[in-house]
């Protein structure tokens, strides 16, 4: 056949997508082997955002890990805070006050809306619908406004504490929330009108990135991605934590397990989350927002400045850290992308032996290669967008 | 008009030669596009407006794009196909071509210059062309359409990866 | 004939001025229009002596920036074609405007001229022929850059443009059948006539959009696809192919691709305006003045004024069509490559054929 | 106007450039392009004679030539693609399947 | 309620009656379960590494257990204690809503166990991460290479004896 000197190649083209590529929001690399426009094989490489989260946590006290958890999923930092706090509280064996649980739930659901907005907006932009992206960015700003009024930070909130939260709801929170939700609903409706019945958008999303329910479970999928395949697994319903057992909400599930179902599930979840927040604000009881246990929660600032006992207590707890008893605990919450779990091991000292974060994005992204195989190059974009890999959480 | 003929004529010859001499298939194809373009200009000089536009549209715009598409699809790089012990045949073929060109030159230089007849406004227009095609040459025209249909089917069948 | 030469120079000057400026201004319009749609302010900086003129100087700033940028050629690129490609993409788009009439006849000082640079007998075919040459610019840019993204973009672009040229041509066959000409001036002039049913003048002009409504939509779709704008911009889909065929371009050459795109928008809008929206025609306005419908009253107007109004009307129509294309661009998501092909070959092409057959029957019936 | 002779001479030169290419080049696609060049040269002859005779029959023939060339290009390129898929080459020296 | 703690790890049999799911495993694999506990309500089984694939298959296949959703696999390094490593697996049963934690102790000089990729495909990247961070070898893994760190990285950073300020070789572009 062809001799070496005149060998002409038509091997499959290897296209290196990422780590810095317009479609890879977050830093990830997909090595796609292409046959024309079709993807024959896709290797996903992660780790570009690895920041040694677990190692860093092992070198600080239990409280000092909170800012690190913010950076896991920066779109919904409060949910990460809550999950970690719940893990430490489980290890300590304490319960937080009712009002604190309400506030955590409210903040979590607002974060969830922000996260879904950040998922759908850019994904729509990447299939070309640029206007919807800006509508959702605007809506996300409103959500962040609300979170800012809670804790003063918009992105990396560091709002939750072991045994409580940093601050109570501000006085005008309810009115502000009402006004912001009206506008957010309008924006979501606008996008709904632009995308949900748009033939081109449906053609791009429907039937791409399909994964069956069995495969999705086998790949360890959780969250909206798993629900899009028709499995109604939602920790908020199945293992109600915080106060999810006191609110009425639905868990939307998809039918075909494709990108369009993932989009629809997320759109509906935003409505459900807003519904939940409104119910919670109705029901929220008065009361303390922090546990009274001095081993866990440090005393109020004015007491620290004025009284000796509290000053010593504050000093000890800040320097030695909270000291959970020896043991291990796993606490999981339903993060916007799936089950976010923290597996914590304590040796009884103020520093953790192990802080393991079970990132939903890590497991979800694992199946990206298989679902891309056999599809077209353009399908990579919505599939990747709808899996909603968050670099900070995936690479830790 | 006279000058335009020589400009485009020499352009056509030059790019034609380059096409034959170029190693790189894409460069060769682009040179052929230039030849086609110059020929279209020459057709305009011959008052063949319709054919000139068709030349651009079909030859330069479609056939050549198809060529380039195929070259890109097959990812043909520089033409490294060395002649293997065929230099003799090469020499002979070039000699034959040069001989034929010399003969042609002799023939044409011996004949006196034949001026072209003036033609009326309608000559070479789309309307006239359509009239001819759809009256005197209707049958060949229809045959050609069948030929194109056959070619489409043939091309699809050939280029398809498997017959399934 | 000096008068003819002056007219010709004037017309060429006007067309170049119009097209190049429109292309520049379109950059600004696009930004502002998208900003309006997306609740933003849009470009509003770039001052000249403190005057920002709502961002109008941005195209200028862009041009200066592009001129002063490094002109980058990748290490293993084919230098000649890499340099040539943007020119090949831009020049045909500019040339195509030559045969598009932007007004009726203009009479100044007893000399009459048709307001078109070249009134070719093969008008529309010329536009197609010239625009098909623009494909080479795109394909060469993709091939010569030595980059997989460029290559894929070039491949996609060549297949897409080749397919949609055919579709575009076929959609217009109905128009040619109705007006009986390929010459754009004649098509435009024919659209000044009115529908006459059973001897009754309805005073509805025979615009292409009314005589060939299906062809109008098909052609507009195909034309947007041909210019590779969203939702048909798979060749430069920034989320998949970074920038497709012009990934490896920078500076002025990048700007030339950008210009070529905007010039193509203008050409397409002008072509659609001429073929389907009556070109320079304003309903009931004739060279001798305004004819009041259903009466014989004629409000006389000087021919110069009528000519100028025609040019204005043509520009208006072009602007409306440009605005339409921009709205589409900022509203719709992008097709997938195979979906574009399916749309072209399996939807628009058969519909265009149906349109041809139907038009044939109607023309035959009416001419009986 | 240039006389008919010049058109014919140009046409002949182009035709023989095409012949030379067909005889010397080994890349099937370039050989194919040379054939297209020869067809074009013939077209020029047709049009020149048509102009000389003041008849448009030559145009009709040129039209048919272009049409057939388009069909031929489609099929020919499809054959080249098919061959390339099977044999990984477009060198005509190696495409000797039918040489028996 | 505090669990009996041995060394610095929570281990040893809990006095409580085991949950039905744990009971099933205990019945079937009585010889392979080293210990069990349910500290803070998390069912935990410590299993011999030889039996881990069988136990996992059993947990996944058994109709009244059906631990089909693999959640997490990680390792913990209890440096001075031997066996030094412990691979921790978290499972969830979607039909029954059960959770289970499996722990596999591994010796510091022989951190090897069989891969679980044949049971749940999802374990692929998690095992790669455990290899990357702790140097635990999963025998039979199809593609056991670093995932979060780069190929040239030396050592396994989450081991307790890895100095936190260690410098790693800088790498430039390859060619």
Image (cartoon, coloured by chain):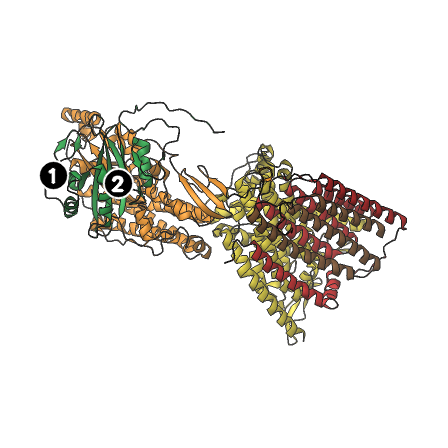
* Left or right of A184 on screen, residue B84: right
Q: Which chain is green?
A: E
Q: Is residue C207 above or below residue A163?
A: below
Q: Is residue D8 above or below residue E117?
A: below
Q: What colour has chain C? A: yellow
Which element type, helix, strand or loop, lies under badge 2? Answer: strand
Q: What colour has chain A? A: orange
* Left or right of A294 on screen, residue A70: right
Q: Quadrant of the N terminus of chain E?
A: top left
Which element type, helix, strand or loop, lies under badge 1? Answer: loop
Within-10-Å neighbours for mark 1: few <14, some 14–19, many 20+: some
Where residue A341 is drawn, which disc sits there? Answer: 2
Q: Which chain is brown?
A: D
Please name the residue shown 56% across and 39% down the image: C58
State how many labels appear. 2
Quadrant housing residue E11? top left
Label 1, label 2: how far apart the Cα atoms are: 24 Å
Q: Position of residue C335 (x, y in %)?
A: 49, 52
Q: Is residue E168 above or below residue B73?
A: above
- Determine if residue A377 is in view: no
Q: Is residue A112 above or below residue B145?
A: above
Residue that lies at the very extreme toward the left in this rendered image = E15
Q: Position of residue E85 (x, y in %)?
A: 24, 31
Chain for disc number 2: A
Q: What colour has chain B? A: red
Where residue E14 is drawn, which disc sits there? Answer: 1
């Amino acid at each position: 056949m062809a001799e070496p000197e005149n060998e002409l190649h038509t091997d499959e083209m290897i296209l290196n997508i990422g780590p810095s590529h317009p479609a890879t929001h977050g830093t990830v690399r997909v090595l796609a082997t292409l046959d024309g426009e079709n993807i024959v094989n896709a290797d996903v490489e992660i780790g570009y955002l690895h920041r040694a989260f677990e190692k860093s946590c092992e070198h600080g006290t239990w409280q000092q890990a909170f800012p690190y958890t913010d950076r896991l999923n920066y779109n919904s930092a409060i949910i990460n805070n809550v999950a970690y706090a719940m893990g430490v509280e489980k290890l300590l064996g304490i319960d937080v006050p009712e009002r604190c649980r309400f506030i955590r739930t409210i903040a979590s659901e607002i974060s969830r809306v922000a996260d879904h907005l950040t998922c759908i907006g850019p994904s729509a932009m990447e299939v070309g619908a640029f206007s919807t992206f800006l509508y959702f960015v605007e809506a996300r700003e409103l959500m962040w406004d609300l979170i800012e009024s809670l804790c003063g930070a918009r992105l990396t909130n560091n709002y939750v504490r072991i045994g409580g939260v940093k601050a109570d709801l501000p006085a005008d929170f309810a009115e502000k929330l009402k006004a912001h939700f009206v506008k957010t609903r309008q924006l979501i409706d606008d996008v709904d009108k632009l995308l949900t019945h748009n033939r081109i958008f449906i053609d791009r999303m429907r039937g791409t990135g399909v994964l069956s329910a069995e495969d999705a479970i086998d790949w360890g999928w959780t969250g909206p991605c798993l629900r899009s395949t028709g499995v109604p697994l939602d920790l908020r319903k199945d293992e109600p934590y915080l106060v999810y057992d006191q609110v009425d909400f639905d868990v939307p599930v998809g039918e075909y397990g494709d990108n369009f179902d993932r989009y629809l599930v997320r759109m509906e979840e935003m409505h459900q989350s807003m519904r939940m927040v409104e119910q919670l604000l109705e029901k929220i009881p008065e009361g303390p927002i922090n546990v009274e246990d001095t081993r866990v929660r440090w005393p109020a600032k004015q007491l620290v400045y004025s009284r000796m006992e509290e000053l010593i207590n504050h000093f000890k707890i800040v320097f030695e850290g909270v000291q959970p008893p020896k043991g291990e605990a796993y606490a999981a919450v339903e993060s916007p992308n799936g089950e976010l779990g923290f597996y914590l091991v304590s040796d009884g000292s103020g520093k953790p032996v192990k802080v393991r974060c079970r990132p939903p994005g890590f497991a979800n992204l694992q199946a990206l290669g298989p679902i891309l195989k056999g599809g077209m190059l353009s399908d990579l974009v919505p599939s990747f967008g709808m899996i909603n890999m968050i670099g900070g959480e995936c690479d830790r | 008009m006279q000058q335009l003929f020589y400009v485009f004529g020499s352009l056509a010859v030059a790019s034609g030669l380059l096409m034959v001499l170029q190693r790189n298939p894409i460069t060769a194809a682009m040179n052929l596009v230039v030849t086609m373009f110059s020929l279209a200009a020459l057709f305009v000089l011959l008052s063949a407006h319709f054919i000139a536009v068709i030349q651009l549209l079909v030859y330069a715009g479609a056939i050549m794009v198809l060529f380039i598409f195929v070259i890109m699809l097959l990812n043909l790089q520089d033409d490294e196909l060395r002649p293997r012990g065929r230099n003799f045949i090469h020499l002979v073929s070039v000699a034959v071509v040069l001989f034929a060109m010399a003969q042609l030159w002799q023939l044409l230089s011996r004949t006196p210059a034949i001026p072209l007849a003036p033609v009326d406004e309608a000559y070479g227009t789309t309307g006239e062309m359509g009239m001819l095609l759809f009256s005197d040459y209707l049958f060949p025209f229809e045959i050609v359409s069948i030929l194109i249909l056959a070619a489409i089917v043939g091309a699809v069948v050939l280029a398809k990866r498997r017959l399934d | 004939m000096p008068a003819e030469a002056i007219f010709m120079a004037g017309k060429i000057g006007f067309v170049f001025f119009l097209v190049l400026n429109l292309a520049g201004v379109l950059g600004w319009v696009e930004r502002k229009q998208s900003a309006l749609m997306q609740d933003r302010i849009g470009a509003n900086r770039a001052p000249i002596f403190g005057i920002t003129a709502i961002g109008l100087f941005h195209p200028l700033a862009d041009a200066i920036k592009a001129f002063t940028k490094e002109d980058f050629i990748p290490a293993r690129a084919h230098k000649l074609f890499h340099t040539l490609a943007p020119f090949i993409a831009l020049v045909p788009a500019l040339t195509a405007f030559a045969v598009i009439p932007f007004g009726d006849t203009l009479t100044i000082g007893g000399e009459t001229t048709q307001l078109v640079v070249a009134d070719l007998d093969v008008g529309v075919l010329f536009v197609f022929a010239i625009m098909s040459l623009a494909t080479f610019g795109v394909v060469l840019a993709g091939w010569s850059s030595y980059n997989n993204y460029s290559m894929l973009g070039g491949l996609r672009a060549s297949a897409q443009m080749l397919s949609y040229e055919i579709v575009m041509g076929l959609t217009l066959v109905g128009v040619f059948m109705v007006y009986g000409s390929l010459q754009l001036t004649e098509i435009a002039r024919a659209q000044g006539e009115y529908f006459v049913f059973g001897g009754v003048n309805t005073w509805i002009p025979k615009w292409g959009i009314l005589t060939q409504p299906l062809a109008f939509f098909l052609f507009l779709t195909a034309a947007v696809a041909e210019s590779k704008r969203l939702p048909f911009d798979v060749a430069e889909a920034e989320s998949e192919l970074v920038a497709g065929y012009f990934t490896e371009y920078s500076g002025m050459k990048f700007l030339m691709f950008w210009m070529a795109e905007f010039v193509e928008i203008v050409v397409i809008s002008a072509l659609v305006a001429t073929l389907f929206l009556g070109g320079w025609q304003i309903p009931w306005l004739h060279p001798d003045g305004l004819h009041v419908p259903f009466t014989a009253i004629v409000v006389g107007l000087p021919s110069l004024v009528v000519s100028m109004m025609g040019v204005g009307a043509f520009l208006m129509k072009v602007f409306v069509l440009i605005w339409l294309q921009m709205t589409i661009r900022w509203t719709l998501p992008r097709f997938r490559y195979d979906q574009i092909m399916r749309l072209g070959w399996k939807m628009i092409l058969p519909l265009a054929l149906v349109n041809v057959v139907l038009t044939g029957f109607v023309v035959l019936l009416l001419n009986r | 106007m240039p006389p008919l002779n010049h058109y014919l001479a140009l046409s002949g030169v182009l035709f023989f450039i095409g012949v030379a290419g067909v005889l010397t080049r080994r890349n099937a696609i370039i050989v194919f392009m040379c054939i297209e060049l020869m067809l074009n040269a013939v077209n020029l002859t047709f049009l020149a004679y048509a102009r000389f005779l003041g008849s448009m029959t030559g145009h009709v023939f040129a039209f048919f030539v272009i049409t057939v060339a388009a069909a031929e290009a489609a099929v020919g390129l499809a054959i080249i693609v098919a061959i390339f898929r099977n044999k990984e080459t477009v060198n005509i020296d190696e495409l000797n399947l039918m040489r028996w | 309620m505090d669990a009996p703690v041995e060394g610095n790890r929570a281990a040893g049999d809990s006095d409580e009656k085991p949950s039905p799911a744990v009971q099933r495993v205990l019945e079937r694999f009585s010889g392979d379960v080293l210990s069990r506990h349910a500290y803070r309500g998390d069912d935990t089984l410590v299993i011999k590494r030889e039996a881990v694939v069988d136990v996992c298959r059993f947990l996944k296949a058994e109709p009244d257990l059906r631990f089909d959703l693999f959640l997490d696999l990680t390792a913990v390094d209890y440096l001075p204690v031997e066996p030094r490593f412990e691979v921790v697996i978290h499972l969830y049963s979607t039909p029954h809503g059960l959770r289970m934690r499996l722990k596999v102790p591994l010796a510091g000089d022989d951190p090897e166990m069989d891969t679980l990729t044949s049971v749940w495909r999802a374990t692929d990247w998690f095992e790669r991460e455990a290899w990357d961070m702790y140097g635990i070898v999963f025998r039979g893994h199809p593609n056991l290479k670093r995932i979060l760190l780069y190929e040239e990285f030396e050592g396994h950073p989450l081991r307790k004896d890895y100095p936190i300020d260690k410098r790693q070789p800088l790498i430039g572009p390859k060619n």
